[in-house]
Image (tube, rainbow, N blue to C red):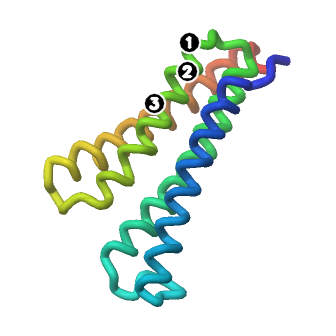
Amino acid sequence: MHMPSITAGYLAILALLYAVLALQVIRLRLSNQTAFNDGGNSGLRSAIRAHGNFMEYMPIIALMVALIEMSGTPPVRIHLLMGALLVSRLLHPLGMYAALNSPMFLICRGGGILITIGLLVSCAVTVLARLMAGTMG
């Protein structure tokens, strides 16, 4: 079995991004003296959602990519999948802080969501196809 070293490298970078998102929530909670929820602060609300959205999508996609890598997929494909995941997870929080319906909001948040959902479906279909073909495991 091939160890998912490419996926692991990207996960380390994604973990650092997750730490930045978490620290942003902590910073805003402290500055707004808000221990729970968002206290009606839109900046804190955006930070909470950027942090939450990261954890809602990143783990399952990264897990599927690791499984795809372990099944012997060429390294370039793994770099493309994990690179796209990294880009999507960088774009989304930028869009969360942009003005509603501004070009930055639409490009970053919309692009981040589009790439993320595309990866989710692409990876799921790949895993299912490999399982059905008997080339996984």
Residue 129 found in image quarter: top right
Q: Nearer the viewer, residue 59 or 86?
A: 86
Looking at the image, residue 29 lies above or below residue 75:
below
Q: Residue at x 62, y 13 (%)?
A: 75
- Give the structural element (helix, strand or loop) at label 3: helix
Determine the CA span between mark 2 and mark 1: 5 Å
Looking at the image, residue 82 lies above or below residue 116:
above
Q: Which mark is residue 79?
A: 2
Horizontal and vertical percent position of residue 124: 58, 32
| Amino acid at the residue labelled 2 | His
* Dot 3 alpha-carbon crowd within 10 angstroms: few under 14, some 14 to 19, many 20 or more: some
The quarter of the picture where the C terminus appears is: top right
| Amino acid at the residue labelled 3 | Ala
Looking at the image, residue 125 lies above or below residue 24:
above
Q: Which residue is mark 1?
A: 76
Horizontal and vertical percent position of residue 8: 70, 32
Q: Mark 1 vs mark 3: which is more N-terminal?
A: 1
Horizontal and vertical percent position of residue 115: 39, 36
Q: Residue at x 54, y 29 (%)?
A: 82
**Mark 1 near mark 3, Cβ–Cβ under 8 Å?**
no
Q: Disc count in the image?
A: 3
- From the viewer's perspective, tell me whether residue 41 is left or right of residue 29: left
- Give the structural element (helix, strand or loop) at label 2: helix
Q: Which mark is residue 84?
A: 3
Determine the CA span between mark 1 and mark 3: 12 Å
Q: Nearer the viewer, residue 123 or 89?
A: 89
Most extreme residue toward the right is 1
- Give the structural element (helix, strand or loop) at label 1: helix
**Mark 2 near mark 1, Cβ–Cβ under 8 Å?**
yes
* Dot 2 alpha-carbon crowd within 10 angstroms: few under 14, some 14 to 19, many 20 or more: some
